[in-house]
C-alpha cells in the first residue's frame, strides 16, 4: 500500500519535472531571438544582454507555470491539446514581451513544440525498453522490493534523455540559424514550419498506434521501436537541414544586396569625382582670369574707388566659396561629400557642422573614407529627430596611430540592439541597402584593424569610427 502511494506521488511529480525541463529548454531557445526594446543610456551592450537573459528566463518560467496549471486543473482534453493550448498561450506571451517579428516567434513556438515532443517520444521508447529489460533480469526478479528504486531510476533516465535530445536539437537550431534578428516573411515561415508540423502530426499518429499495439499484444517489437526512434531523429535532422537551406538562401540574397549597394556607392563616388572635376575646371577658369581680377582691383584702388573694390572683392570671394562649397577637408572627394550632406541637412532644417579633415599620407584609401562618410551621414540625416535644436556634428582627429572619426546627431528615440553584432537593429527594410550602413562602416574599420563604438547620451546618437594608420 505504501509503495502504491509512492508510485502515485512519482507519477504526479514526473510531469511537473518534465514541464520544468521544457520550460528551461524553451528559455534557451528564445533567448538569442529576444531584442531589448530600450537601449541603456550608457550604450552598454552587456546591460542589453542581461535584459535579454531576464526576458528569456521570464518566458521559460511562464511556460512552466502554464503547463503546470494545465496539468493540475481537471480539464476534459488530451495531453496533445493541452500542450497545443500552452504553446498558443506562449506565442501571445512572447509577442507581448517583444513586439516585433511575429512570424519568427510563430516559428520558434512550432519548432519547440515539435522538438520537445519528438525528444519525449525517443526518451519514452528508451525508457520502456530499459525498464522492461532491467525488470526482467534475474536480479530484479529475486529482489522485487527494489523495483521502486528501478522505477525512480528509469524515470530520471527518461527526464535526462528528454532533456539531452531537446537540448541537442535546440543547440543545432541556434547554431545554424544565423540571422536571428532578420524579419521573417510568410513564405519563409511556411517553409520552416512544415518539417516541424509534419513531425508533430506523425508523432501523434505513431504514438497512438504504438499504444494500441502494446495494449493488444502486451509489448512492442524492438525493431519497431528502433525504427520509430530513427524516424524521430531524422525528423529533427530535417528541421535543422531546412533551417540551413533557409539561411543559405538569405545569405545569398544579402550578398546580392551588398553587391547592389556597392554598385550604388561606386556610382555615388563616380558622381563625386565628376563634381570634383567640374570644381577643378571652375578653379582653372578662375586661375586663368585671376590676373584680370587683380588688375581690375588695382585700377579700382588707384582710382580711389575703395567701395567698388570691396564690393568686387566680396563678389569674387562669394564665387570662390560657391565653387568650393565652403568645405576644406584636405581632399576634394570628401569636400564634395560633406558639402552634399550639408545641403541635405539644411533642407531638413538641421544644423550641420564639420571639422573633418582627410588623413593625408595615412595609407587610408579615399574610397574607404567615402564609404564611411556616405553611410554615417546618411544615417545621421535620416535619423535626426524633430526638435528645436536639430544638429549634426562631424569631427576627425588622431590619437597616436589611431585615426578617429566622430559623428554626433540629435536623437531622442530608443534603439534595439543586437548583442551579437554589437550594432543597433535596423527598423528599415534592407531591400534598398540602407539597413547595411553600420555593417559597411564596421567592415571598413576592421580593414584597418579598427572598430566602431556607439552610445546614446544627452539626447545625441554618437558614433566613433577608429582606424589604425602607419
Image (tube, rainbow, N blue to C red):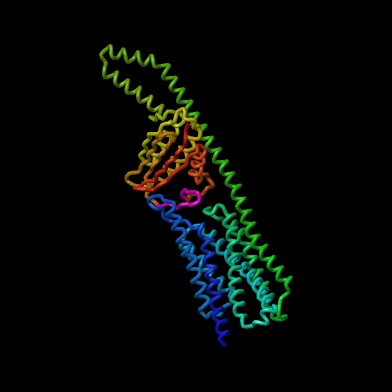
Vertical side of 195 occupied by 207: above or below: below
Residue that protrudes farthest toward the bottom in the picture: 1
The residue lying toward the viewer, choosing from 222 and 179, is 222
Say left or right for 223 vs 348.
Answer: right
The percent coordinates of residue 362 (x first, y second) are: 47, 30
Q: Identify the residue shown where x is 47% and y is 29%.
A: 275
Give the x, y percent position of residue 33: 51, 57
Lateral position of residue 49 relative to residue 293, left or right: right
Residue 454 as seen in the image, left or right of residue 430: left
Which quarter of the rendering shows the N terminus? bottom right
- The range drawn in magenta is 414-424
Residue 158 or residue 53, whichever sits in front: 158
Instruction: Verify whether residue 351 appears in magenta.
Output: no
Q: x and y percent of residue 411 in the render?
A: 38, 47
Image quadrant where residue 216 sits: bottom right
Q: Main secondary structure of the magenta part?
A: loop
Amino acid at each position: 500500500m505504501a509503495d502504491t502511494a509512492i508510485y502515485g506521488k512519482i507519477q504526479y511529480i514526473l510531469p511537473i519535472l518534465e514541464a520544468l525541463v521544457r520550460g528551461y529548454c524553451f528559455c534557451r531557445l528564445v533567448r538569442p531571438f529576444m531584442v531589448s526594446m530600450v537601449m541603456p543610456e550608457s550604450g552598454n551592450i552587456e546591460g542589453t544582454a542581461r535584459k535579454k537573459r531576464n526576458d528569456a528566463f521570464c518566458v521559460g518560467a511562464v511556460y512552466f507555470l502554464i503547463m503546470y496549471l494545465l496539468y493540475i486543473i481537471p480539464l476534459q482534453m488530451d495531453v496533445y491539446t493541452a500542450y497545443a493550448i500552452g504553446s498558443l498561450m506562449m506565442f501571445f506571451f512572447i509577442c507581448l514581451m517583444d513586439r516585433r517579428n511575429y512570424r519568427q516567434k510563430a516559428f520558434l513556438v512550432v519548432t519547440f513544440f515539435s522538438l520537445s515532443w519528438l525528444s519525449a517520444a525517443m526518451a519514452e521508447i528508451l525508457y520502456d525498453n530499459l525498464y522492461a529489460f532491467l525488470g526482467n533480469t534475474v536480479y530484479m526478479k529475486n529482489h522485487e522490493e527494489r523495483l521502486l528504486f528501478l522505477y525512480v531510476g528509469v524515470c530520471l533516465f527518461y527526464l535526462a534523455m528528454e532533456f539531452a535530445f531537446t537540448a541537442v536539437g535546440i543547440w543545432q537550431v541556434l547554431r545554424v540559424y544565423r540571422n536571428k534578428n532578420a524579419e521573417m516573411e510568410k513564405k519563409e515561415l511556411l517553409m520552416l514550419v512544415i518539417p516541424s508540423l509534419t513531425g508533430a502530426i506523425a508523432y501523434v499518429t505513431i504514438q497512438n498506434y504504438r499504444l494500441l499495439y502494446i495494449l493488444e499484444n502486451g509489448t512492442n517489437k524492438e525493431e519497431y521501436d528502433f525504427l520509430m526512434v530513427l524516424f524521430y531523429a531524422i525528423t529533427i535532422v530535417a528541421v535543422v537541414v531546412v533551417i540551413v537551406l533557409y539561411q543559405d538562401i538569405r545569405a545569398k540574397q544579402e550578398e546580392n544586396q551588398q553587391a547592389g549597394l556597392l554598385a550604388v556607392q561606386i556610382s555615388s563616388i563616380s558622381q563625386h569625382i565628376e563634381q570634383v572635376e567640374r570644381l577643378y575646371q571652375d578653379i582653372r577658369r578662375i586661375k586663368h582670369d585671376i590676373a584680370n581680377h587683380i588688375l581690375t582691383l588695382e585700377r579700382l584702388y588707384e582710382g580711389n574707388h575703395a567701395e567698388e573694390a570691396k564690393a568686387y572683392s566680396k563678389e569674387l570671394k562669394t564665387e570662390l566659396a560657391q565653387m568650393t562649397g565652403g568645405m576644406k577637408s584636405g581632399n576634394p572627394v570628401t569636400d564634395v561629400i560633406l558639402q552634399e550632406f550639408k545641403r541635405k541637412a539644411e533642407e531638413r532644417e538641421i544644423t550641420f557642422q564639420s571639422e573633418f579633415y582627410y588623413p593625408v599620407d595615412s595609407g587610408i584609401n579615399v574610397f574607404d573614407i567615402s564609404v564611411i562618410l556616405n553611410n554615417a551621414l546618411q544615417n545621421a540625416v535620416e535619423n535626426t529627430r524633430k526638435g528645436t535644436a536639430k544638429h549634426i556634428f562631424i569631427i576627425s582627429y588622431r590619437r597616436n596611430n589611431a585615426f578617429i572619426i566622430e559623428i554626433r546627431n540629435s536623437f531622442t528615440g530608443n534603439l534595439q540592439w543586437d548583442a551579437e553584432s554589437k550594432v543597433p537593429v535596423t527598423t528599415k527594410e534592407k531591400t534598398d541597402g540602407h539597413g547595411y550602413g553600420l555593417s559597411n562602416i564596421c567592415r571598413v574599420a576592421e580593414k584597418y584593424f579598427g572598430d566602431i563604438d556607439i552610445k546614446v547620451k544627452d539626447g545625441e546618437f554618437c558614433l566613433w569610427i577608429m582606424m589604425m594608420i602607419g
